[in-house]
Image (tube, rainbow, N blue to C red):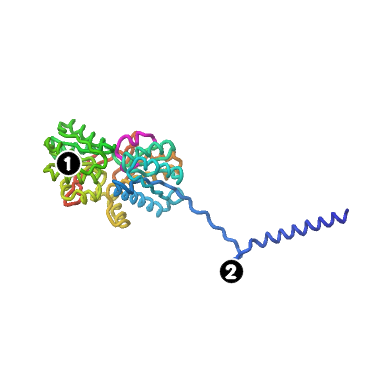
């Protein structure tokens, strides 16, 4: 019995020694590889931000500018070390200018891509589809350009970088009445678009309040390309100005068809005109038209000229207002995350509310409804180019 015990004790000792030797030897390596193990540092933390924009569809040029403006802002932050110790990663989704697609894009970014915040989207009808999703998930959202007041009324996680339609409509009406001396105006708009319908309503109400007369208020269905019926009716009433709240693609056609019908008065619109395609579509008919906007590349402020230089160097063309507002929206969001010291939704929301930010489109603070308080500019179409006309303070 004692011999057995000695045998097993010896065996255990031998196995223990062998195990120690194997442990010291380390893992085997391929021939020619270094025998010492090397540890791979963990990848840097990423701050994943969603961007939603109409990259295809009726407002595709808006989507391109929005994506590029947000990307430039992210690149600049990353070049300076990133955000909260990590690099900013943008995940871009195409809403195609369609509310159903927008809802799907917002959901996908939140559920699958795990974004901590969203810059987007452009069109008010699409932001109104995405905002309830962000609000329910407590994901901060800042729209660069959705001007319909209802967007931020969805909830306290929803912000915007642009002024709202009541202000824009009021500015347009005052400019028409005071600066152009117009006393009779007509409006045409896309009845299926919250932005265009609302903007025309705000223009109408302010113009009447100032003492002007609205002699035509004509709606057209989304997708219309022949506006002659609405224009013939309006022009017969003798307006001095036609207020076209539609996006650039429709606005260009409307102006062209109105001139063909003999209209010789003014055209005026909103920031939806801001696209190089306006002139491509409307040609000479857009000449002398005016529109309210958030930004002019001709503004001499250093913030504006620095953006124009950086954007042109990166993308080969100067920024439009869509690019500038996306740049501002992204920077507002990044600044809020930085000040919050976390990507936690409620903390970022609170930091956004307290913003006092020197943006390209002006010094921005937020009112109680998370709408920015800032100025607007008037742009004139002259020789096929956008020309800065005036700045209107809030």
Residue 271, image quadrant = top left
**Residue at the location (16% across, 44% down)?**
257
Dot 1 or dot 2: first in sequence order is 2
Is residue 154 something that shows in the picture?
yes
Residue 207 painted magenta: no
Whether label 1 touches label 2, CB < 8 Å: no
| Residue at the extreme bottom | 32
**Residue at the location (81% across, 55% down)?**
9
**Which residue is identified by label 1?**
228
Cα distance between the residues tagged 1 and 2: 80 Å
Answer with left or right where residue 132 lies relative to residue 254: right
Q: Position of residue 285 (x, y in %)?
A: 16, 47
Q: Secondary structure at mark 2?
A: loop
**Residue at the location (26% across, 42% down)?**
223
> Start and end of the magenta stretch?
143-156
Q: Position of residue 235 (x, y in %)?
A: 13, 38
**Which residue is identified by label 2?**
32
Residue 144 painted magenta: yes
* Residue 106: image tag: none
| Residue at the extreme right | 1
Badge 1 density bin: few <14, some 14–19, many ≥20, Cα 10 Å:
some
């Amino acid at each position: 019995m004692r011999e057995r015990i000695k045998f097993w004790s010896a065996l255990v000792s031998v196995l223990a020694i062998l195990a120690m030797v194997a442990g010291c030897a380390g893992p085997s390596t391929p021939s020619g590889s270094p025998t010492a193990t090397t540890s791979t540092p963990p990848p840097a933390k990423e701050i994943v931000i969603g961007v939603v924009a109409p990259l295809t569809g009726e407002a595709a040029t808006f989507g391109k500018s929005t994506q590029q403006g947000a990307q430039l802002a992210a690149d600049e932050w990353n070049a300076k070390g990133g955000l909260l110790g990590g690099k900013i990663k943008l995940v871009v989704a195409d809403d195609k200018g369609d509310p159903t697609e927008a809802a799907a894009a917002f959901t996908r970014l939140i559920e699958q891509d795990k974004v901590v915040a969203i810059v987007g989207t452009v069109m008010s009808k699409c932001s109104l589809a995405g905002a309830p999703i962000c609000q329910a998930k407590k994901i901060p959202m800042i729209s660069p350009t959705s001007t319909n007041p209802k967007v931020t009324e969805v909830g306290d996680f929803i912000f915007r970088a642009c002024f709202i339609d009541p202000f824009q409509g009021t500015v347009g009406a005052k400019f028409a009445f005071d600066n152009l001396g117009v006393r009779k105006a007509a409006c045409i708009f896309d009845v299926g678009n919250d932005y265009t319908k609302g903007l025309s309503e705000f223009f109408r109400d302010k113009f009447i309040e100032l003492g002007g007369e609205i002699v035509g208020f004509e709606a057209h269905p989304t997708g219309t390309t022949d506006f002659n019926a609405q224009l013939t009716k309006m022009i017969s009433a003798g307006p001095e100005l036609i207020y076209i709240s539609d996006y650039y693609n429709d606005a260009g056609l409307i102006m062209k068809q109105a001139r063909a019908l003999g209209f010789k008065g003014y055209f005026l619109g909103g920031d939806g005109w801001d696209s190089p395609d306006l002139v491509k579509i409307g040609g000479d008919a857009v000449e002398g038209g005016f529109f309210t906007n958030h930004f002019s590349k001709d503004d001499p402020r250093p913030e504006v000229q620095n953006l124009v230089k950086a954007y042109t160097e990166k993308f080969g063309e100067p920024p439009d207002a869509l690019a500038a507002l996306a740049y501002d929206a992204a920077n507002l969001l990044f600044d809020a995350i930085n000040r919050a010291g976390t990507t936690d939704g409620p903390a970022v929301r609170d930091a956004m509310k307290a913003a006092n930010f020197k943006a390209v489109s002006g010094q921005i603070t937020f009112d109680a409804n998370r709408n920015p308080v800032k100025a607007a500019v008037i742009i004139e179409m002259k020789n096929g180019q956008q020309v800065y006309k005036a700045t209107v303070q809030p």
